Amino acid sequence: MAFLSAASLGAQEIPLPSGSIKINFPDGSPLLIAGTVTDQSRATARGAAMVIDLDLLLQLRNVSDRQIHGVTLRVVAQEVTVGGYGSVAYPSLHVGPGETFPARVAMQLVRPTQAVSASLVEVNLDGVLFQDLSFYGPDRLNSRRAMTAREMETQRDRDYFKRVLAQAGPAGLKTAMLESLTRQAERPRLDVRVIRGGPAITSAANPAPERTAEFAFLKFPDSPVAPVDGYAQIAGNEARAPRINVRNDSKRVVKYVEIGWLVRDQNGQQYMAAAIPTADPGLLMRPGGTAQVLQDAALNFSRDGRPVNVRSMTGFVSQVQFADGKMWVPDRASLEKEYLLGLLPPSNEEQRLSDLYRKKGIGALVEELKKY
Amino acid sequence: MNHPNQATLALQAGGDLGPLARWRLERHLARCGRCRDEVASFQAVRELLPEVATLPEIRWNRLAAEMKANIRLGLAAGDCVRAEPAPLRDTPLFAGARAAVALASVLVLMVTGLVLQHPAPKPEAAAIEGVELQTTAHGIQVREGGGTLRLLDGGAQDFGMQINGRLRYVPAVTYTPGAQGSMGAGYMDPETGYMTVTNVYAE
């Protein structure tokens, strides 16, 4: 009731000052802004606070002579969150020279005061990935690595569905799509809250004592990096400070490793919890060398509003980047063999293809796969 | 489509709706993105302003004393305005029962006051230090101090479909937390038709 009285103070809309969104694309960018629409943006007073809805629709034109496969924009609202920022990426693109595509950024800012100043949000181009995996952009968010990994997963999963189509025809592809949608529907999901810079135990309501838990590992035969051992601090449904020792089993220098982190609850149900990337941006792990993957954020796990207590943990190598920028991701057979397909979220491409199948049917999906 | 008013949405955000009204509203919210957004906005402000989630300070003891005095005054006034001596049964039992009822009422009032003087603790979210990243009903957000930056999923909605004779609900958004302090969401943007991946990061 008290909240109602606060709400009743008003929900009046206030026009946004011009220049609330500043868009910066560097000179020489392979993308040109061909149009901008922001007419759905508005600011609304909620009691003493201000809620600002910004809906930005950009028409971006490829002015390069290469096909674009991915774009990442960096979103900063310095006056709202000093210690945080965002990004919006568009993977699975096929934008040829001279073609345009729509890029939408929908966001909401909540400020504790009703003051609305100019330049609330800055949207900057962080990177563009081309078909040959070459890259353009300042890469402040490590977009190159993220987009390259997504592109490899895209090619892996598209090739898989193309193989199914070639071997079993449209009926086989339909079966594979239904299996994918079933996995997506049945995948056990956790609500994860990540806190950085807070206390070791984030919830005063968590009475469980903290303990050091050891990781078990899944190992893929073709992985260039092998996990050796690893630990994290666990207290009830909270985990923090994962640290994992890894060894470079390849003949190439490795500069980045990412570990997938699975947790199992008291009922034996397993969930994908988070990814643990290497923290050292200057990492260079020589063949046979070792390194430690560690992070300091605290993670809080729940499901349907109830805490999910961690009984055990499992890790697996999910990404490796070599010194020359090339990347390794697990193949589909390895994921299937270790029952990870049912635990991991689908790749962007699998999500896109299954959405196409659901909305337009098997015929449209077959035509889509024939394009590549 | 008839939309509920702002007060109903605000009550829903605060968890103050009755069971029947809540059930009816949740049926509406399941198919109305606009009202879901409104409820999410109210919830965001509620998280941001924990002070509005608690009752203002009221001097309950003083209020109880005033009400007790008013009850006495009312009883006395009732005696005064009677035209002639009331045909009351002047048995001690009746007088005692009336006094007991009045005293019990006052006691109930005082106990209620005491309970309300010790309100429930503030929501846990309000006590967070540092930078917090989490999923919300319509996207992902980074929250620090009094400010929130939320990247929305553009209205992507879970869908139900019959697979092998069984209705299954497929989530429209996949979330990927990062232990370095990040949260990602991937979805097909219903407006552009393009796959979109948003991320929020703690510095």
Image (spheres, coloured by chain):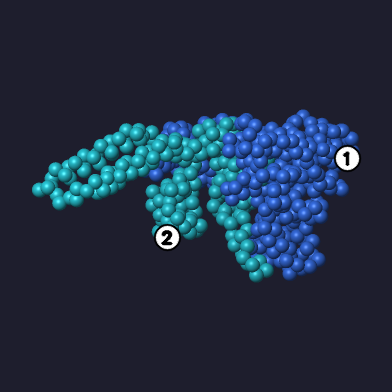
Give x and y (percent) for residue A210: 69, 35
- Along the line of sight, which residue is nearer the eye, B202 or A268? A268
Q: Which residue has dot 2 on it?
A: B1
Tell me which amino acid carries mark 1: Ser
Give x and y (percent) for residue A139: 68, 35
Query: Circle 2 sits in a helix, a strand or a loop, which is it?
Result: loop
Chain letter tied to cyan: B
* Residue at image point 81% right, 66% down: A167
- Seen in the picture, residue A198 relative to B177 is either above or below; the reply is above
Give x and y (percent) for residue A45: 41, 39
Q: CA distance from mark 1 to mark 2?
A: 61 Å
- What label does residue B11 carry, if any? none
Look at the numbered discs 1 and 2 and tell me whether their residues touch, using CB distance below 8 Å. no
Mark yes or no: residue B76 visible.
yes
* Residue at image point 21% right, 39% down: B73
Mark yes or no: residue B203 visible.
no
* Residue at image point 33% right, 44% down: B104
Tell me which amino acid carries mark 2: Met
Q: Which residue has dot 1 on it?
A: A250
- Along the line of sight, which residue is nearer the eye, B54 or A298? B54
Q: Is residue B122 left or right of residue B101?
A: right
Chain ID of residue with mark 2? B
Q: Is residue A317 left or right of residue A109?
A: right
Within the image, what quadrant is residue A337 found in?
A: bottom right
**Are the numbered discs 1 and 2 placed on the same chain, yes or no?**
no
The tint chain A carries is blue
